[in-house]
Amino acid sequence: KGQLWVDKYAPKSFMNLLSDEKTNRNVLAWLKEWDAVVFGAPVGKIAPPKAFANPDFPERTDGPEQKILILYGPPGVGKTTLAHILARQAGYMPAEINASDQRSAQGLKFRLEALMENKASFTNGRPNCVILDEIDGLPGSEGAGAVDVLVKLIKEASGMG
């Protein structure tokens, strides 16, 4: 009672997702490539079927070659829902930042760094999976600054910066 319709009927698990199955499996497989790095365990038990395997991205022990995943598409297709459900499925605690809520690129950088570096933010032993939503929400030059912040953080985290 008192629950919004969109929340009441929102998908709660992988099996409830109505989005493209190939996309769902590829995103989950990408997340599971982080298992060795994040959990200190071999790449997860959930592997994409051979039909979904991508020969351009062989199995690695240092996380996926592509360190960031961008989901894009028109509003309302379920990108954020997909990210939250698959993060939980892969063993993470979804930590969402809505970029349009940030006042500046510097504010966004502060929030991202706090979520990426704060090991105390593990909940029930689950590491954060940072979901950055509405990156196009920062206006004008701040939007460009936000992209610069992201690129710099990714390079630093990858040892390239």
Image (cartoon, rainbow, N blue to C red):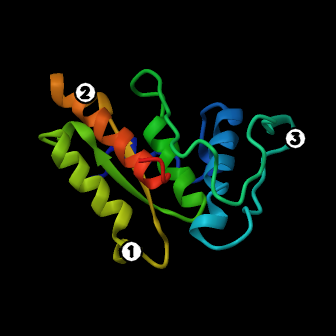
In terms of depth relative to the viewer, which is nearer, 123 or 14?
123
Amino acid type at image mark 2:
Ala
Which structural element holds mark 1? helix
Q: Give coordinates of residue 120: x percent, y percent.
A: 35, 77
Q: Quadrant of residue 89?
A: bottom right
To which residue does mark 2 refer?
144
Which one is closest to the eye, mark 2 or mark 1? 2
| SS for callout 2 | helix
The image position of residue 88, as x and y in percent, is 53, 60
Q: Residue at x 23, y 33 (%)?
A: 145
In front: 22, or 62? 62
Looking at the rendered structure, the number of numbered marks drawn on it comes to 3
Give percent across and percent down for residue 123: 41, 74
Which residue is disc 1 drawn over? Answer: 119
Within 10 Å of the Cα at label 1, are there few (<14), some (14-19), or many (20+) other Cα atoms? few
Residue 12 visible, this angle: no
User: For the residue labelled by badge 3, is the local secondary structure a helix, a strand or a loop?
Assistant: helix
Left or right, 88 with reference to 130:
right
Of badges 2 and 3, nearer the viewer stands 2
- Which residue matches tag 3? 50
